Image (spheres, helix red, strand yellow):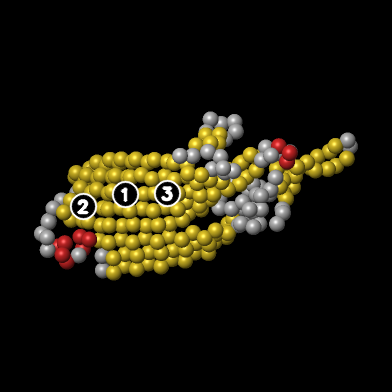
């Protein structure tokens, strides 16, 4: 499908609509076993006519090990909480101009006659940027949970990134909005909390957070292994 926007320099109406269908199910057995699943079906007006809708599932599970009978039989009164949790989910990004997928025209006058000037190319295949996330974590609590420790390992893979990519000069333009490439992030988060003092009207808490993240570009577009965004110092290199 081909669509176009007519832009008026004095009064430009911005159209950006989002339609969603959402469902979620949760299960909790005796505060020991926890499951959750959700599904979103989102449609964005900023995308091309052939690719407006995206499906975004998510699932998570948790196991409160310290609530198991065998844990209590260990008689570790100083070790109060031990929980394992993991999750997988897909999220979408639609943060682009409302005209990104459409050819745009501007009214103009040439040689005394009214006409239109093409401002940009459209892309009917422009769709959602999607991030696939996996998270595996463990939570610990010691000495009546005065000391709390969380260890979190994650990996995030972002596909079909939303960028303006170069096009052949014969088109009369330099770039077009498109979905390109793949970037992977993986890392670990460590959070440590000390609840030093706690009273009816006061508390004293110490908190420290450590994060390590590595990012890798695994794919660009048109077989390229390096791409620098025009007029910026930002460059992406595969590997």
Task: Specify which label sits upstream in the sequence, 1 or 2.
Answer: 2
Q: Distance of mark 1 from mark 2, alpha carbons?
A: 15 Å
Image position of 53 (left or right of 185): right
Quarter of the image for residue 69 reads bottom left
User: 10 Å neighbourhood of mark 2: few (<14), some, or many (≥20)?
Assistant: some
Q: Residue 61, how many percent across, how many down?
A: 33, 61
The x and y percentages for residue 228 are 56, 34
Can the viewer see residue 17?
no
Q: Is residue 102 left or right of residue 219?
A: right
In the rendered image of this protein, does residue 89 appear above or below residue 199?
below
> Dot 3, crowdedness within 10 Å: few (<14), some or many (≥20)?
some
Query: What residue is disc 2 on?
Result: 141
Give the position of the C terminus as an image quadrant: top left
Residue appearing at x 42%, y 41% in the figure? 215
Q: Circle 1 — which element?
A: strand
Along the polypeptide, which appears first: circle 3 or circle 2? 2
Q: Position of residue 116 (x, y in %)?
A: 80, 43
Q: From this viewpoint, which residue is outermost toward the right?
A: 112
Camera-nearest residue between 19 and 159: 159
Residue 18: percent from the left, percent from the top? 58, 57
Lateral position of residue 187 relative to residue 68, left or right: right
- Residue at horizontal 26%, vertical 53%? 139
Determine whether the residue tagged by mark 2 lies in a helix, strand or loop.
Answer: strand
Residue at disc 3, secondary structure: strand
Label at residue 152: 1
In front: mark 1 or mark 3?
3
From the image, state whether disc 1 or disc 2 is nearer to you: 1
**Residue indicated by mark 3:** 156
Q: Gap between marks 1 and 3, in whole Å?
A: 13 Å
């Amino acid at each position: 499908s081909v669509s176009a926007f007519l832009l008026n320099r004095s009064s430009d109406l911005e159209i950006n609509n989002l339609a969603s269908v959402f469902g979620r199910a949760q299960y909790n057995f005796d505060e020991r076993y926890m499951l959750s699943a959700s599904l979103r079906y989102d449609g964005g007006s900023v995308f091309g006519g052939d690719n407006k809708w995206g499906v975004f599932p998510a699932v998570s599970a948790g196991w409160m090990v310290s609530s198991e009978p065998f844990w209590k039989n260990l008689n570790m009164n100083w070790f109060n909480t031990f929980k394992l949790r993991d999750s997988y989910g897909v999220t979408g990004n639609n943060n682009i101009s409302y005209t990104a997928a459409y050819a745009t025209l501007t009214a103009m006058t040439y040689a005394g006659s009214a006409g239109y000037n093409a401002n940009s190319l459209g892309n009917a295949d422009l769709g959602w940027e999607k991030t696939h996330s996996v998270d595996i974590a463990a939570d610990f609590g010691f000495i009546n949970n005065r000391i709390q420790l969380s260890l979190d390992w994650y990996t995030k893979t972002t596909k079909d990134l939303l960028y303006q990519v170069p096009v052949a000069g014969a088109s009369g333009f330099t770039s077009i909005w498109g979905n390109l490439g793949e970037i992977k992030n993986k890392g670990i988060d460590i959070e440590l909390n000390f609840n030093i003092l706690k009273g009816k009207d006061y508390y004293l808490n110490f908190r420290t957070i450590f994060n390590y993240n590595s990012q890798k570009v695994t794919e660009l577009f048109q077989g390229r292994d390096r791409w620098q965004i025009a007029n910026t110092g930002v460059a992406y290199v595969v590997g």
